[in-house]
Amino acid sequence: MGYKIFTLSPGSTSTKLAVFDGQERIFKANVQHDPAKLRTFARVSEQLPYRVETIMEELGKAGVSLEDMDAFAAYSGGLESTPGGIFPVNDKILEDCTSGRLMEHPAILGAQIIHAFAEKTDKPAYLVNPPDVDEFEDIARLTGIKGVYRESHVHVLNQKEVAMRAAAGLGKKYEESNLIVCHVGGGLSITAQKAGKIVDGNDVLNGDGPMAPNRSGYVPVMPIVKMCYSGDYTLQEMKEKISKTGGLISLVGTDNMLEIKERIAAGDKWAKLVYDNFAYQLGKYIGSYACVLCGQVDAIVMTGGVSNDEQFIENVKSYCGWIAPVIVYGGDFEMEALASGAIRALEGTEETKEYTGVPVWSGFDFEPEN
């Protein structure tokens, strides 16, 4: 038995909770919040008392006491870009999250909720590899259009957690490993992780990388420009084509992999082509990220819900298995990642970092004006 860690992740109308005793999860819940009640709040941060109240009701039913916890950890966004690591919740984190100046999304509540719990119990509260982590190298930021630069928008928390697990399984330290990590869920992020940093990755928010079950991924730019100016689509409809109804949904009408495989078994040639192309696109990007790592790849790591599909994994391996061993961690390990990070902080095996609110990258200071 070890440290007891309380973890949480706020969603649009719910908050995921979990309690870990060491690495063992001993409690989990997904607290539902009344959507009608949530709509009465003008700003996301105003939801804080209501969310805390409903969380406490759930904990009371389960007999979970905050006083028994050694630390709290949360998924929390709304920060300036920052290096990866473990961050004690400080005044600047609370200022940026509470103001919502960088985003108005329930993710900004994570830090606020665990800060409230930490104050109540006099225990530490941590953010672990928040979604605003950006460790890109300068050379990865350029595009072919001046002023349009690449920034890191990937599934950082799960990406780093499975990378650490894979490195440990290989008998290496994370900081000494070169890994290509693919999170394949409703969205898809692929990263090149070199010596403990995500030095390159696809931008899952802005249509970069391979297609995903409900996201378009990269498509040729000029046809999209023509669609935007055709008068047939609104800005919101075009955004949804990229981030909500693209990928498998656009091509076969569903993002349910089991349904697609049933259609293939029934002889649907189009469904098979799309299913095969899904792995083909991912394999192609894995190959490009092997180039980012100069061919020095210790392992290719597959994670996310789709990684539970053995046939999909075999299809991906057929394209890139020659590069490095393929290690699979099917599913999502974000809650485990939060708990592990808090434990490393408590044990002193990873030094915590101070969030300053100063972005790690805000443009090139040596870029010519013209």
Image: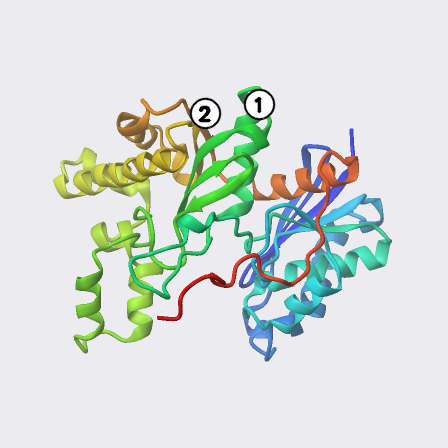
Relative image position of residue 159 (x, y in whole percent)? 51, 41
Left or right relative to 99: residue 197? left
What residue did someone put label 2 on? 298
- Marks 2 and 1, how far apart at CA: 10 Å
Tell me which label, 2 or 1, sits earlier in the chain.
Answer: 1
- Asked whether 192 or 10 is in front, the reply is 192
Name the secondary structure under disc 2. loop
What residue did someone put label 1 on? 172
Type of residue at label 1? Lys
Name the secondary structure under disc 1. loop
Type of residue at label 2? Asp
> Count the marks: how many?
2
CB under 8 Å between callouts 2 and 1? yes
- Whether residue 186 is visible to the viewer of this picture, yes or no, is no
- Whether residue 332 is visible to the viewer of this picture, yes or no, is yes
Relative image position of residue 160 (x, y in whole percent)? 54, 39
Which residue, as the protein is rendered here, is positioned at the far top?
171
Which quadrant, please, contains the C terminus? bottom left
